[in-house]
Amino acid sequence: MLLHRDSKEYYPVSFLSLQPYDVKEQMQDWDEAFDWTDYFGRPGVEVYKMVVSGNDEIQGAIALARKEDHVFILLLEGAPHNRFGKTFKYVGLHLIAFACKRSMEIGHEGAVALESKTKPKLLSYYTQVVGAKHYGSGLMVIEEPIAEELVMLYLT
C-alpha cells in the first residue's frame, strides 16, 4: 500500500499492463531519456503501470524481462509527481516488490536482477534499503529471502 506523504493514509495499488495510449496520454512529462514504447512487443518482456486501486493515474511503471532463472528489471520509474516522495512515498520499493512477485509467479523464487546506474547514492539505496547484493559494474541481485520480505512489506 502506498503511503500518501501529506495525509499519511495508505492506498492499495494495482499493477496493470502499460499500453501505448498510457504513454501518450499520461507520461509526456516523464523522463525523456526513457522511451517506454521501446519495450512494447518484445518477446519475454512485460510492461506494467502501477495505479492506486480505483484510479487511472499512473504512479509508477516497470519493464521486466523474463530470463532463464530470474526476472530482469529493464526500466523502472516513478511518476514525476512522486519523485522524492512528493505525493506518494515508496513507489520504487513497490515496483521492485512487484518484480519479485512476478519472479515468484513464474517459478523463479523471487530472484530479480537489475543494472543500477553506478552513482554511489543509488548503489547504497539498493544495498541498504532494498537489500540487494552488488556484484560489480552496477549489477544488483535480489534473492529469495529479501524478495519475500519486499512482497510482504509492500504488496500485502
Image (spheres, grey):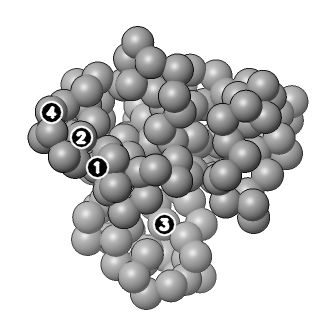
Relative side of 6 to 151, left or right: left
Give SS at disc 2: strand
Which one is earlier in the sequence, the residue at label 2 or at label 4?
Answer: 2
Marker disc for residue 9: 4
Q: Amino acid at mark 2?
A: His
Circle 3 sits on which residue? 140
Q: Give me the C-alpha separation between circle 3 and circle 2.
A: 28 Å
Q: Amino acid at mark 3?
A: Met
Sort mark 3 into few (<14), some (14-19) or many (20+) by Cα contacts within 10 Å. Answer: many
Q: Nearer the viewer, mark 3 or mark 2?
A: 2
Q: Nearer the viewer, mark 1 or mark 2?
A: 2
Relative side of 99 to 128, left or right: right
Q: Residue at x 78, y 34 (%)?
A: 24
Which one is earlier in the sequence, the residue at label 4 or at label 3?
Answer: 4
Relative side of 86 to 22, left or right: left
Marker disc for residue 115: none
Q: Amino acid at mark 4?
A: Glu
Q: Is residue 134 visible?
A: yes
Q: Nearer the viewer, mark 3 or mark 1?
A: 1
Circle 2 sits on which residue? 4
Circle 1 sits on which residue? 89
Give SS at disc 3: strand
